[in-house]
Image (cartoon, rainbow, N blue to C red):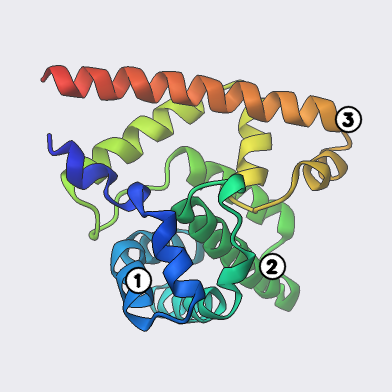
C-alpha cells in the first residue's frame, strides 16, 4: 500500500498558506491542486449533487483567497481548516434547502451522522483512500453514541464546543470530554490500522 500518496493531502505545509496570505497566486494554485479532489469528494457526499458541489468549491476557494489571514495554525492543520470550511458551507446549503421545504433539519443531522460513519465510495477515491475511509467509518461506528454525536457536530457541522453544548443541552466540560475521548479512540484505532497496513 502506498502510504505516501495516502497522506499527501494531510501534509499540506502551513508555509504554503503563509504564501497565499501574501497574495502569491502560484501558492494558491498549489493549494488548490493539493486539496481540491478531497474537498470536492466531501462536498459531493454531503450535497449529493456534483454540479452543486463544484459550485460550492468555487465559493470555498474564493473565501479562502479572501480570508486566508483568518487561518490559525494553532487550531489545526491547513487541510483540517479547509475541510471544516467546506463542511460548514455545505451544511449551510443543506439548511437552506430544508428551509425551502426539501427536508427537515433533524433529518439532515441524522443523515450527516450516518454519512460520517459510512459516507460510501466515490469514483474519485484511490484504493488507499477507500481503505482509509472504511477504516475511519469502522472506527467511528465503534465509538459510544454520545461521542459519535459530539464528533459529528464538531467535524461535520463545524460547531464550536460551546455551540455543541447548547445544541445537546449538555455541560461544556462533558462535550469537551466526549470529543477528546472519541478522538483519542479514533487515533488509536487508526494507528493500529496503519501499523497493520505497514506489515502487509
Location of the C terminus (image quadrant): top left
Q: Is residue 44 above or below residue 157?
A: below
Element type at mark 1? helix
Q: Residue at x 47, y 65 (%)?
A: 18
- As drawn, the label of residue 95 is 2
- Local packing at callout 2 (Cα closer than 10 Å; few below 14, some 14-19, many 20+) is some
- Local packing at callout 1 (Cα closer than 10 Å; few below 14, some 14-19, many 20+) is few
Q: Residue at x 51, y 81 (%)?
A: 62
Residue at image mark 3: 171
Rendered location of residue 106, percent (x, y): 72, 52
Element type at mark 2? helix
Residue at image mark 1: 32
Front residue of 159 and 74: 74
- Local packing at callout 3 (Cα closer than 10 Å; few below 14, some 14-19, many 20+) is few
Front residue of 20 and 54: 20
The answer to whether residue 48 shows anywhere in this view is no
Label 1 or label 2, whichever comes before in sequence order: 1
Q: Residue at x 83, y 39 (%)?
A: 165
User: What's the CA distance linking mark 1 and mark 3?
Assistant: 39 Å
Left or right of 36: which side holds 68? right
Rendered location of residue 84, percent (x, y): 56, 56
Left or right of 43: which side holds 32? left
Number of dots carrying numbers? 3
Q: Is residue 150 above or below residue 100?
A: above
Rendered location of residue 53, percent (x, y): 44, 73
Rendered location of residue 182, percent (x, y): 59, 25
Amino acid at each position: 500500500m502506498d502510504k505516501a500518496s495516502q497522506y499527501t493531502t494531510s501534509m499540506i505545509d502551513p508555509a504554503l498558506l503563509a504564501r497565499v496570505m501574501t497574495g502569491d497566486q502560484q501558492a494558491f494554485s498549489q493549494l488548490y491542486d493539493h486539496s481540491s479532489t478531497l474537498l470536492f469528494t466531501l462536498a459531493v457526499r454531503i450535497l449529493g449533487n456534483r454540479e452543486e458541489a463544484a459550485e460550492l468549491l468555487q465559493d470555498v476557494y474564493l473565501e479562502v483567497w479572501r480570508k486566508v489571514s483568518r487561518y490559525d495554525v494553532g487550531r489545526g492543520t491547513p487541510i483540517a481548516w479547509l475541510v471544516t470550511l467546506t463542511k460548514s458551507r455545505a451544511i449551510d446549503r443543506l439548511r437552506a434547502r430544508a428551509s425551502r421545504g426539501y427536508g427537515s433539519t433533524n433529518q439532515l443531522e441524522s443523515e450527516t451522522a450516518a454519512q460520517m460513519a459510512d459516507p460510501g465510495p466515490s469514483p474519485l477515491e484511490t484504493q488507499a483512500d477507500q481503505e482509509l475511509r472504511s477504516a475511519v467509518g469502522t472506527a467511528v461506528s465503534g465509538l459510544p453514541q454520545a461521542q459519535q454525536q459530539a464528533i459529528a457536530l464538531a467535524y461535520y457541522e463545524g460547531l464550536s464546543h460551546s455551540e455543541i453544548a447548547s445544541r445537546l443541552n449538555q455541560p461544556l466540560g462533558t462535550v469537551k470530554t466526549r470529543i477528546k475521548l472519541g478522538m483519542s479512540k479514533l487515533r488509536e484505532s487508526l494507528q493500529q490500522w496503519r501499523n497493520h497496513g505497514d506489515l502487509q
